[in-house]
Amino acid sequence: GYGGAIQVGTPGQDIVVLFDTGSSNLWVPVAAGNSTDDKSSHSAFNPASSRTYKNTSEVFDIMYGSGPVSGFFVSDDVSIGSLTLKHFTFAEVPDTASLPNYENMEFDGVLGLGFQMLSVGEKPTVIERLVESKQLAQ
């Protein structure tokens, strides 16, 4: 698959995501206790370092062909290059152990490119929000 760096939070923290046409949600790993796990080669989002982070108690659960991923929906600023979505709702995932071979994958999280009807929690997608904000042509 194809991947690339996005920035999450304010100031932006680099997270490498897999661009996935078969799903519609954005999720990023969050460090346990909001600290970096030195055993992992993956980047993890640290909410405590973002001044625009807002958490929710809404549960996020998605099933991929490779396994389930669970966490919570949160809101923060998300940037892809020069395009920025303020207060975007995405999922933070505290434990990626349910994804087999995650430690060898070249991405930290997943950015779904599918339609909102595939979105867990019926959350707006990155692409839809970029089009709505007129940062991306339809």
Image (cartoon, helix red, strand yellow):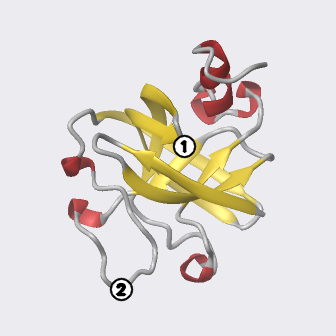
Nearest to the observer: residue 79 or residue 104: 79
Nearest to the observer: residue 59 or residue 104: 104
Element under disc 2: loop
Where in the figure is residue 8, as x and y percent of width and height? 40, 45
As shown in the figure, which amino acid type bears the numbered disc 2? Lys
Q: Which quadrant: the C terminus?
A: top right
Q: Which label sits on residue 81?
A: 1
10 Å neighbourhood of mark 1: few (<14), some, or many (≥20)?
few
Q: Which label sits on residue 39?
A: 2
Pointers 2 and 1 in contact (CB under 8 A)? no
Answer left or right for 77 relative to 34. right
Q: Going 32% across and 63% down the picture, which residue do you hit?
A: 31
Answer left or right for 96 relative to 55. right
Distance between the alpha carbons at the discs numbered 2 and 1: 28 Å
Q: Going 34% across and 35% down the picture, which residue do you hit?
A: 57
Q: Is residue 43 above or below residue 124?
A: below
When asked about the image quadrant of residue 2, the answer is bottom right
